[in-house]
Amino acid sequence: MSLLRAENLTKSYRMGRRLVPVLRKVSFEVEESDFLALRGASGAGKSTLLHLLGGLDTVDEGEIWFRGQNLTTLPPRLMAEFRNKNIGFVFQAYHLLPELSALENVCLPGRMARHSIRELEAKATDLLQRVGLGDRLDHRPSELSGGEQQRVAIARALINDPILILADEPTGNLDSKTGDETIDLLLSLRKERGATLVIATHDADLAGRAARVIQLSDGHL
């Protein structure tokens, strides 16, 4: 059985009086411990597809199955619990809370899952040390570089030991050297933990490192 299966995913957004189609009957599968890259130009639907897979948005038509469970039938509260437990997100824009320190940002998903604060802080500290930020625990996002913020975001995505990691253009706001280092780190941690990784990217070099590549164009595979 595959880890994740998308069947005929269709999604449109309304812009004024127009209904703009983004995804058109997209179907594919992701195996356990797979590394899949979603390629496509800006506006091809990569981010929308990741948001649907992770339950951050809802489909117009189609189904998403995770280890035999139909996620599209889950009510919002149960979907939020499922996402917190099983899925880690790495966003292009980081989405760190500006008023929280690096340590507090990493701990946040674990606090939502009601893990022990003491154990959570120890685990978050270890993760931040692993990503080279052991001396930045108390720094807020405004005190960190773009590459450092993305490393905090990676640590945050891993705090609950997710089965699936979804990364949306994780190097899009970074220079090439920092981007390469960030991807090396993400791939290393993913392999170490046996997680499945799906990355949305327009970067051909990054996509070339994936075990499989899916090309999106005008909402079609």
Image: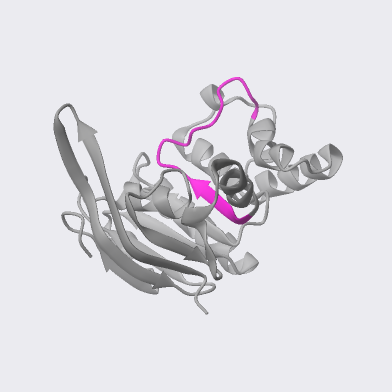
Which residue appears farthest toward the bottom when viewing the image? 1
Question: Image height check: is 32 above or below 93?
Answer: below
Q: Identify the residue at horizontal 76%, vertical 47% (top origin).
A: 123
Q: Is residue 135 visible?
A: no
Q: Nearer the viewer, residue 187 or 12?
A: 12
Q: Nearer the viewer, residue 129 or 3?
A: 3
Q: Identify the residue at horizontal 36%, vertical 39% (top origin).
A: 173
Q: Identify the residue at horizontal 26%, vertical 54% (top origin).
A: 202
Question: Image height check: is 149 above or below 16?
Answer: below
Question: Image height check: is 51 above or below 197?
Answer: above
Q: Which residues are magenta?
A: 86-101
Q: Position of residue 218 (x, y in %)?
A: 16, 54
Q: Position of residue 114 (x, y in %)?
A: 77, 40
Task: Tell whether position 92 is magenta.
Answer: yes
Q: Quadrant of the C terminus?
A: bottom left
Task: Tell whether position 2 is magenta.
Answer: no
Q: Is the image coloured rainbow, by chain, by secondary structure, or in one colour? A: one colour
Q: Identify the residue at horizontal 67%, vertical 36% (top origin).
A: 108
Q: Position of residue 125 (x, y in %)?
A: 74, 42
Q: Going by the image, does 5 lie left or right of 45?
A: right
Task: Report the magenta stretch's main SS.
Answer: loop
Which residue appears farthest toward the top when viewing the image? 99
Occupied quadrant, residue 30: bottom left
Q: Nearer the viewer, residue 57 or 73?
A: 73
Q: Going by the image, does 88 lie left or right of 137?
A: left
Q: Is residue 54 visible?
A: yes
Q: Position of residue 185 (x, y in %)?
A: 53, 56
Question: Image height check: is 114 above or below 181?
Answer: above
